[in-house]
C-alpha cells in the first residue's frame, strides 16, 4: 500500500504543476509590467523626496529602459543555452532585488542603480513564451502565448492605479515593499510550477557580441530618450547617434563572422522574421503613445478647455478598462490566428489601433469617448502583440525561440522609446499658456494621435508583406510523440 501511494502521488503533483504553468508564467508577465509602471506616479514628488533634480529623477525610468533593452536579447540567448527556467528565475530575482533596494533607500544614485537591476524583468515575457512552446502541446500553445503577450498591457494598466493609491495613502517606500513581496512570490511559484525545458542551443556564449550590442543600444536609446531634454542637435545627442551607428555596424560585422552569434542576423534577414521585427517596432510605437497621451490629457487643467483635471489615481482608473480588455481578448486573438494565421491577426490588430486613434482625434474632450478610444487601441494592441510571438515561433528553430523573441521584444522597446520621444517633441511644439504655465494644446494631442495612427497603418502594411505560413506550421503540425520535451518524457515512461 505504501508503494502504491508513493507511485500515485507524483503524477497528482505533476498534473497540478502542469495546470499552473500558464497562470504562473502569466503572473510573472503581469508582475514585470507592474514593476515598470509603478515608479511613474512617484516622478513628480521624487525631487522633493530625494533632494535630486527633476532631470536626475527621470533616470529612474531611463535606467530601467536601457537595462531592459540590453538584457532582453542577452538573457534570451542565455535561456536558450543554459536553461530557460533558470534564467527566468534569475531575471525575476534581479527584479525583486532591485525593488528591495528601492524600499530601503532614499538616495537617488542607489535608486537609479536598483531600477537598473529591475530592468532585467523585461526578459520575462520572451523566456516564458519559449517555455510555453517547449512544454505545451500544439493545441494549447496559441492561447497560452496570446495570454502571455496580453500581460504586458494588463500589468501596465494595473500598475498605475495600484502605485497611485499606495503613494497617495501610504509612505512611498511601501510601494516597493509590496512589489518586493510580489517578486518573491513570482520566483517561488516559477521554481515550484515550471519545468526546466531540455531544449538547448549548444555552443559558447558570445561575450564580445553581448558587449557590442550593449554599447550600441545604450548609445541609441540614450540619445532617443534624452534628445528632447538635451537638444536633438546638441553635441551629446549627435555623438551618441554617431557612436550607435558605428558600434552597431561593427557589431553586425562581428555577428556575421562568428560561428555562435548572440543574434543570428542571417535568420533575422529572412522576410518572415525580419518583417515581424519591423512590425513589432511600429506596433510598439503606436501602442505606447496611447498610454502616454491619455495620462497627460485627462490630467490637464480644466482651464485649457479640454483637460479634465483628474488625479493620478483617477487617471489610472481610466486606463484600467484597457488592461481588462487585453486580458479578456487574448483567447479571441488566438482563435483568429488559428483560423486565419498570425500575420492576418497582426494586420487586423494594427488597423484597429489606427481606428482607435481616429476616435481619439474625433473627440478627446468627453471622458467616456477618451476611455472608448483608448480601449479600442488596447483591443488592437492585444491582437497585434499576441500575433508577434506566434509569428516568431513559426519561423525559427525551437532552440532559438527565447533569443528570437527577445529580439522581437527589443524592437518593441525601441519603438516605445521612439514613441516617447516623438510624443514629447510634438507636444512641446504645440504649446499654449494657461495660468502662466506652458500646456500642450488639444491640436498637439491630435497630431500625436494622428502620428501614432499612421505608424499603426505602417505596422499593418508590414504584416501583410510577411510571407504566408507554410502548409504545416510549427504550432499546428501534428508532432510525433518524441518531438516535444513532454513527448520525450512520455516515451521514456512507456519504455520503462
Image (cartoon, helix red, strand yellow):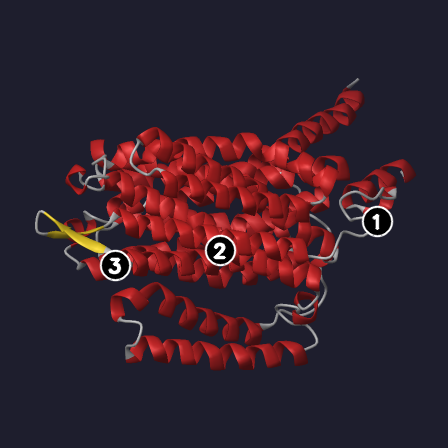
Q: CA distance from mark 3 to mark 1?
A: 50 Å
State which tag comes first along the sequence, 2 or 1.
2
Q: Nearer the viewer, residue 406 or 205?
A: 406
Q: Residues within 10 Å of mark 3 (few under 14, many from 20)?
A: some
Image position of 163 with respect to 82: above or below: above
Residue 119's spot in the image, x, y percent?
43, 55
The residue carrying mark 2 is 455
Q: Residues within 10 Å of mark 1 (few under 14, many from 20)?
A: few
Instruction: Tell which tag, 2 or 1, sits nearer the viewer.
Output: 2
- What residue is drawn where x is 36% and y is 52%? 448
Q: Residue furthest right?
A: 495
- What residue is drawn where x is 18% and y is 53%? 432
Residue 11 visible in the shown view: yes
In which image quadrant can residue 20 be found? top right
The residue carrying mark 1 is 471
Q: Nearer the viewer, residue 247 or 172?
A: 247
Residue 165's spot in the image, x, y percent?
27, 32
- What residue is drawn where x is 58% and y is 56%? 279
Q: Residues within 10 Å of mark 2 (few under 14, many from 20)?
A: many
Q: Classify mark 1: helix, strand or loop.
A: loop
Residue 111's spot in the image, x, y percent?
28, 55
Q: Nearer the viewer, residue 437 or 128?
A: 437
- What residue is drawn where x is 28% and y is 45%? 296
In which image quadrant can residue 374 be found? top left
**Image quadrant occupied by the C terminus:** top right
260 left or right of 32?
right
490 left or right of 358?
right
**Could you say which disc has been placed on residue 428 in the image?**
3
Q: CA distance from mark 2 to mark 1?
A: 31 Å
State which tag comes first along the sequence, 3 or 1.
3
Image position of 178 with respect to 458: above or below: above
**Image quadrant occupied by the N terminus:** top right
Amino acid at each position: 500500500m505504501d508503494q502504491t501511494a508513493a507511485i500515485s502521488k507524483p503524477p497528482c503533483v505533476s498534473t497540478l504543476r502542469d495546470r499552473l504553468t500558464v497562470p504562473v508564467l502569466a503572473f510573472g508577465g503581469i508582475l514585470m509590467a507592474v514593476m515598470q509602471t509603478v515608479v511613474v506616479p512617484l516622478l513628480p514628488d521624487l525631487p522633493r523626496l530625494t533632494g535630486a533634480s527633476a532631470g536626475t529623477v527621470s533616470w529612474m525610468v531611463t535606467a530601467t529602459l536601457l537595462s531592459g533593452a540590453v538584457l532582453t536579447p542577452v538573457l534570451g540567448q542565455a535561456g536558450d543555452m543554459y536553461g530557460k527556467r533558470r534564467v527566468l528565475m534569475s531575471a525575476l530575482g534581479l527584479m525583486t532585488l532591485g525593488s528591495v533596494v528601492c524600499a530601503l533607500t532614499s538616495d537617488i544614485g542607489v535608486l537609479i542603480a536598483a531600477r537598473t537591476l529591475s530592468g532585467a524583468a523585461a526578459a520575462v515575457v520572451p523566456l516564458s513564451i519559449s517555455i510555453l512552446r517547449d512544454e505545451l502541446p500544439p493545441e494549447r500553445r496559441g492561447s497560452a502565448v496570446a495570454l502571455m503577450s496580453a500581460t504586458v498591457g494588463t500589468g501596465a494598466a494595473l500598475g498605475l492605479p495600484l502605485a497611485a493609491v499606495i503613494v497617495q495613502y501610504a509612505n512611498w517606500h511601501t510601494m516597493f515593499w509590496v512589489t518586493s513581496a510580489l517578486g518573491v512570490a513570482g520566483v517561488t511559484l516559477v521554481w515550484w510550477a515550471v519545468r526546466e525545458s531540455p531544449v538547448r542551443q549548444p555552443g559558447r556564449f558570445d561575450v564580445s557580441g553581448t558587449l557590442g550590442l550593449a554599447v550600441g543600444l545604450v548609445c541609441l536609446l540614450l540619445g532617443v530618450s534624452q534628445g528632447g531634454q538635451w537638444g536633438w542637435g546638441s553635441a551629446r545627442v549627435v555623438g551618441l547617434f554617431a557612436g550607435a551607428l558605428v558600434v552597431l555596424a561593427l557589431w553586425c560585422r562581428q555577428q556575421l563572422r562568428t560561428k555562435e552569434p548572440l543574434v543570428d542576423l542571417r535568420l533575422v534577414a529572412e522576410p518572415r522574421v525580419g518583417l515581424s521585427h519591423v512590425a513589432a517596432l511600429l506596433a510598439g510605437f503606436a501602442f505606447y503613445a496611447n498610454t502616454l497621451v491619455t495620462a497627460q490629457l485627462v490630467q490637464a487643467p480644466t482651464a485649457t478647455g479640454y483637460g479634465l483635471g483628474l488625479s493620478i489615481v483617477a487617471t489610472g482608473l481610466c486606463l484600467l478598462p484597457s488592461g481588462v480588455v487585453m486580458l479578456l481578448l487574448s483567447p479571441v486573438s488566438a482563435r483568429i490566428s488559428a483560423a486565419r494565421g498570425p500575420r492576418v491577426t497582426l494586420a487586423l490588430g494594427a488597423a484597429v489601433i489606427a481606428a482607435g486613434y481616429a476616435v481619439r482625434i474625433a473627440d478627446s474632450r468627453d471622458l467616456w469617448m477618451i476611455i472608448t478610444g483608448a480601449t479600442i487601441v488596447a483591443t488592437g494592441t492585444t491582437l497585434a502583440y499576441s500575433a508577434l510571438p506566434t509569428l516568431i515561433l513559426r519561423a525559427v528553430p525551437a532552440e532559438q525561440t527565447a533569443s528570437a523573441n527577445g529580439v522581437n521584444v527589443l524592437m518593441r522597446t525601441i519603438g516605445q522609446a521612439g514613441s516617447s520621444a516623438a510624443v514629447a517633441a510634438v507636444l512641446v511644439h504645440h504649446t499654449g499658456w494657461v495660468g502662466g504655465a506652458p500646456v500642450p494644446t488639444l491640436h498637439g494631442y491630435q497630431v500625436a494621435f494622428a502620428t501614432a495612427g499612421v505608424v499603426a497603418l505602417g505596422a499593418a502594411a508590414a504584416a501583410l508583406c510577411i510571407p504566408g505560413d507554410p502548409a504545416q506550421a510549427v504550432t499546428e503540425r501534428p508532432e510525433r510523440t518524441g518531438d516535444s520535451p513532454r513527448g520525450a518524457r512520455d516515451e521514456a515512461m512507456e519504455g520503462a
